[in-house]
Each structure stands twice: as C-alpha cells, then as structure tokens.
Image (cartoon, grey):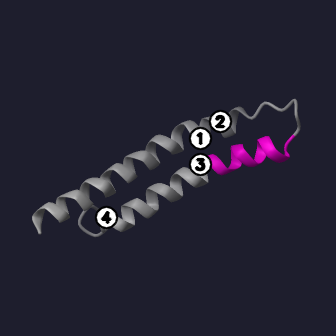
C-alpha cells in the first residue's frame, strides 16, 4: 500500500477519515436531543481521529521525503 499510494492520497484519506469520524457526533450535537448520550458516536470519534492523524502523518512524511530526494 505504501508503494501504490502517493503522498496526496494519504493526505486525502487521512482528512476523509477524520471528517467521517467526527461528522456523526457533530451532527448529533447539532440536531439530536439535548439529553442524549451518544457513546457509540464518541467511540467512533476516538478511533477515527488517531487513524486519520496517522494517515496524515504518513502523507506528510512521504511528501517531505520526496522533496528531500529532489
């Protein structure tokens, strides 16, 4: 996977994972009941954000290495 994906692909995937992990909880807080308890959505956020950050970090590292090799 590291060979097939470019740095931009990792950056896009990381941002997408973060947005898709945070969006349900944010929408629930905006549109859901005031006394709700979205534990599952919070757990989704807790898992998705570090995974997305890892993908962003890999993308940035690949971008840095590519620029240093030029």
Give the number of the disc on residue 21. Answer: 3
Residue 57 coordinates in the image, percent (x, y): 34, 49
The answer to if 6 sits in the magenta stretch is no
The image's mark for residue 42 is 2
Distance of label 4 from label 1 (alpha carbons): 24 Å
**x and y percent of residue 66 in the render?**
18, 64
* Residue under the point 65% across and 35% down: 42
| Comes first in the chain, label 3 or label 4 | 4
Provide the residue designation for mark 4.
7
**Magenta range:** 22-32
Residue 30 inside the magenta-drawn segment = yes
Residue ranking furthest to the left: 69
Residue 50 horizontal side relative to residue 36, left or right: left
Which callout, 2 or 3, points at the residue further toward the start of the chain? 3
Q: Are marks 3 and 1 in contact (CB under 8 Å)?
A: yes
Sooner in the amino-acid sequence: mark 4 or mark 2? 4
Type of secondary structure dominating the magenta stretch? helix
> Gap between marks 3 and 4, in whole Å?
21 Å
Whichever of callouts 4 and 1 sits on the residue coming sooner in the sequence is: 4
Residue 45: image tag? 1
SS at circle 3: helix
What residue sits 38% from the left and 67% below the top? Answer: 9
Left or right of 29, for residue 41: left
- Position of 11 with respect to 27 (left or right) is left
- Crowding around mark 4 (Cα neighbors within 10 Å: few <14, some 14 to 19, many 20+) is many
> Within 10 Å of the Cα at label 3, are there few (<14), some (14-19), or many (20+) other Cα atoms?
many
Q: Nearer the viewer, mark 3 or mark 4?
A: 4
Decide: marks 2, 1 in contact (CB < 8 A)?
Answer: yes
Q: Residue at x 70, y 48 (%)?
A: 24
């Amino acid at each position: 996977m590291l060979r097939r994906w470019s740095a931009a692909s990792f950056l896009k995937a990381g941002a997408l994972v973060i947005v898709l992990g945070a969006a349900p909880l944010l929408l629930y807080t905006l549109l859901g009941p005031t006394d709700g308890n979205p534990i599952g959505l919070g757990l989704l956020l807790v898992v998705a954000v570090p995974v997305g950050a890892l993908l962003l970090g890999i993308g940035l590292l690949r971008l840095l290495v590519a620029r240093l090799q030029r």
